[in-house]
Amino acid sequence: MVSRRIIPALDIQEGRVVKCVRFLNPRDAGDPVDLARLYDAEGADEIVFLDITASHEKRGIILDVARRVAEEVFIPFTVGGGIRTVEEMREILKTGADKIFINSSAVRTPDLIGEGADRFGSQCIVVAIDGKLRPDGWYEVYVNGGRTPTGLDAVHWAEEVARRGAGEILLTSMDADGTQAGYELTLTRRVADTVPIPVIASGGAGTLQHIYEGVTTGGAEAALVASLIHYQIHSIREMKTYLRDHGVPVRL
Amino acid sequence: MIAIVDYGMGNLRSVEKALQKIGQTASVTADPAEIGRADRLILPGVGAFGAAMERLRAPGASGTSLATAVTDFARSRRPFLGICLGMQLLLTESEELGEHTGLDLLPGQVVRFDVSEHPDLKVPHMGWNALQFPRASPLFAGLSEGAQVFFVHSYHCVPADASVTTATCDHAGPFAAALQRGNLYATQFHPEKSGDIGLHILSNFVGV
């Protein structure tokens, strides 16, 4: 049986890892290659890099980061943030990255999903979905880093991106993100039950139990972790040992 | 010299970097003559079977296609490793997006995972999964049963001769994770993305 995956997420700004502390500006947390190597050694199953570089001129820096990661780290890694075209996907995949993810541009230009899948294979194309619970019980897709509501139903959108050729869904609950109160299990389960492709749960993990719930009750194949490891609350090894001890298949 | 076949399908740089990591020099090439001169050949690749065969069969500048160069190499008894799609292409035919014929170096079919009776299982089979070794192969020397490697694929190989299967894995039932016949080695998983275990497997390939 395929192991449930633990995937550290690193926010990259102008080639450096940043930690965003609430109400404070992003703070430098080191070299992405050093951190990627460290997380690889600790047992990360994959690594996700989110490029949050605002300046368009400096966006090429992420390609250099990806190239250096590919030389040092021999587990799969994914790069996303601001990708708008198939050509930009190609540039990233050429560095040695295994997958790219798109979010806002997939909503703006849904054909991008199929074009990327046709060109590079579905396995390369991850669609990130940010969902927020509406008072009447459905989850609305937001884009532009959670600033813009789209009117789209997250479960329907997930179904559509899978049909269009996405290989995986990175699902973030905006309500849970940053709370450390656990993944949004209802949303995660609804999407996981609806799509035939793997779902990565994201947003809200604060304890080992939360990770366990994400990959069992939530039905996710993988758990994205950020604050838990960046603030050294739990190591990846602790997470995996906990999952294994509770009967979840992991790579240890 | 190790040659990595560049036919425009997927992540060639990862294989090259992994070989460098274990102290090997590799050349990523689309030149049939260079493939002919190599000591070892790796056929990597991700993407669709039909598109890959189309690119392999396209006549090159010299008039020789990569399919011919790869086939000649495979028959020359020098060590050959197919990875992921590069494994599937060695078989007779695939049902991916229609019927496509492969290189037919190892008789067999490439079929889609049937998870209809396993609602909790996903396709693609993506992630780390454990290997079992039904028979010994130099490729897996030094590894124990249960070693985990990284897979990402929606189709899998069904060799006509089950005895060529050197590793199996489980996703909606057992499937062939690696094949070997003589100098021909093939892995469905990505050794170049399977951490230390993957680098160990590549070192084994370099040593055969």
Image (cartoon, helix red, strand yellow):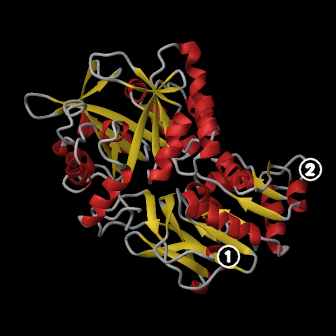
- In this view, A218 is above or below B139: above
Query: Would you place residue B156 above or below residue B136 in this image?
Result: above
Instruction: Please name the residue shown 41% across and 62% down the image.
Output: A251
Whether residue A176 is visible: yes
- The quarter holding residue B173 reads bottom left
User: Which amino acid, by three-letter code, is at mark 2?
Assistant: Ser
How many neighbours does mark 1 have within 10 angstroms: few (below 14), some (14-19), or many (20 or more)?
A: many
Instruction: Measuring from the top left, give residue A252's x and y in whole percent.
Output: 41, 62
Q: Is residue A203 left or right of residue A37?
A: left
Identified by mark 1, the residue type is: Leu
Which quadrant, please, contains the N terminus of chain A? bottom left
Sequence-first disc among 1 and 2: 2
Relative to B135, A238 lies left or right: left
- Residue B127 pos. (x, y %): 44, 57
Residue identifier under label 1: B106
Q: Is residue A234 left or right of residue B4?
A: left
Q: Nearer the viewer, residue A168 or A59?
A: A59
Where residue B45 sits, quadrant-wise, is bottom right
**Chain letter for mark 1:** B
Chain letter of disc 2 in the image: B
Checking the image for residue B62, the label placed there is: 2
In the image, B84 versus A52, the foreground residue is: A52
Q: Is residue B88 above or below residue A6?
A: below
Residue at figure coordinates x 83%, y 61% from the top left: B69
Looking at the image, which is closer to me, B107 or A251? Answer: A251
User: Could you tell me which residue is drawn at 85 percent across and 50 percent down?
Assistant: B31
**Location of residue B63 in the rendering, given as x and y in whole percent from the top left corner:** 90, 52
Q: How many angstroms separate mark 1 from mark 2 (CA)?
A: 27 Å
